[in-house]
Image: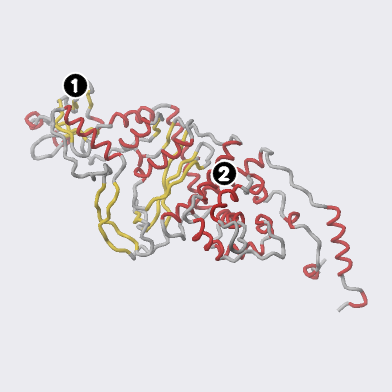
Amino acid sequence: MLKKKNRMATNQVEFVCISELVPENHLLRAVNDSINFDFIYEEVKDLYSHRTGRPSIDPVVLIKLLMLQVLYVIRSMRQTISEAQMNIAYRWFLGYGFQEKIPHFSTFGKNYERRFKESDLFEKIFVKILTEAIECGFIRADAAFIDATHVKASANKNKYIKKMAQHRAHKYKRDLFIEINEDRQEQGKEPFDDDDNDPGGEATEQKEVKESTTDPESGMFHKGDKERCFAYTASVACDRNNFVLGVKAAPGNVHDSQMFSEIFEDVAEKFEEIEAVVVDAGYKTPGVCREIVKAGKLPVMPYKRPMTKKGYFKKYEYVYDEFYDCYLCTNNQVLKYATTNRDGYREYKSDPQVCAGCSDRLRCTQSKNRTKVVTRHIWESYVEIAEDVRHTPDGQDLYRMRGQTIERVFADAKEKHGMRYTRHRGLRKVQHYLTLVFACMNLKKLAMWKRKRGMLPPIPTVFPALSSKLSKIFAACLSPLPGLAA
């Protein structure tokens, strides 16, 4: 039987409560109940005048608008405002009724430039949400999973200039230089001059870079078969339960291992219970291994393929004798210590007279002087500790968890929260943006876990019988009389 819907119901005036129109299982209900957003007032009170000026837009509303944009992957603040005007759940989350006007889309931009840009508000929001997760017992930080991913910048890859830039060298360089000279002095060698380091003790280096004319603070990113583009690097640490523990942004041309120190120090300071640090092969350097071990943590790293040419003996086929401080080649010939170079590698050289008559010389070296050189970093012992951990059952289990933890965090951030690229320009803005993205991801997980475990307060019912009865009265009064039908 064909039936037509009476569309006059859309013109009826109904007496309803906006809270009743939001489903009980809606994500925003769980988010709103999982944390008290009133802490924002305390954080921003010094950014507003208490005596002069017009009344401001509620700062909690401004932050919640940003959270809506991240949680529902809305491409701009203009569209977020447009969605909030029509979406009942958004209005309820912001605390706005049906007749209230949502703030103009330019309001947040003005507030950000004048108040929030130079503050640490976004970091404090991130810490507050993480603290709530800690208090609920959701954080398992006995192991920290650290990795980095790139975020495409809002910049044309073909618009750039080439220039020589002063780059701050790796923080390990100064410590390494000191230990190199100590090692040389122990071996009776002259120490190197300190010409490459500035008087302040911070090592710097010059190199040619491509600087974007659109966003000069981004960096040219290129890795493997991926397309060259201007980007930012996001270094992130998470726990076993995929809660993000820290995030640091850097230009896209900064290597992952150079950003490791900042994110590791930040996370290690907050979570003293960390016992192991799980990273991929890109972090398997003597400096990173040394920092993890000296901090009292276990470095969990994968096997790293040796960069030896095909057909030559691999480095692990040369055996190091720690007692005599020498290497033994595949024919049991001794390679003696020769010197320690500026890069921190100790050089062990063979006897050219012995190598000249060796049948395996072409698989060992093709140098004109018939001398094989094997290098060993002065911090190589820390890498060997990582190798020992790699072969333990616990180390293997932890490394296998990377696909379920940090890789899953990156996948969710890019697929579900639009982190493949950023529309913000400037390192500080991108840092704020990334901090908010991962704060919202933590908040979303916190809300879902609280709901599953029954830790959220019950949903209040606002006069259900009265509202239902009044709705019927209004509907009866406003319905057209039989004799006055159009």
Q: Quarter holding the N terminus? A: bottom right
Residue 319 can be seen in this image: yes
Rendered view: 136 above or below 22: above
Rendered view: 440 above or below 5: above
Question: Quarter of the image holding residue 346?
Answer: top left
25 or 65, which is in the foreground? 65
Q: Type of residue at label 2?
A: Ile
Rendered view: 92 above or below 85: above
Categorize mark 2 by other alpha carbons within 10 Å: few (<14), some (14-19), many (20+): many
Which residue is pictured at 16% across the width and 38% down the height?
192
Q: Position of residue 131 (x, y in %)?
A: 56, 40
Q: Type of residue at label 1?
A: Tyr
Which residue is pictured at 46% across the width and 61% down the height?
423
Residue labelled with disc 1: 324
Question: Quarter of the image holding residue 467?
Answer: bottom right
- Horizontal relation, residue 86 to residue 243: left or right: right
- Horizontal relation, residue 24 to residue 377: left or right: right
The secondary structure type at the circle numbered 2 is helix
Please report whichever mark, 2 or 1, sits nearer to the chain's N-terminal start: 2
Residue 2 can be seen in this image: no
- Residue, far left: 353
Which residue is pictured at 13% across the width and 33% down the height?
190
Categorize mark 1 by other alpha carbons within 10 Å: few (<14), some (14-19), many (20+): few
Q: Quarter holding the C terminus? A: bottom right
Separation of residues labelled 2 and 1 (CA atoms): 55 Å
Q: Position of residue 41 (x, y in %)?
A: 60, 51
- Residue, far front: 51
Q: Position of residue 400 (x, y in %)?
A: 45, 36
Q: Position of residue 439 (x, y in %)?
A: 54, 47
Residue labelled with disc 2: 129
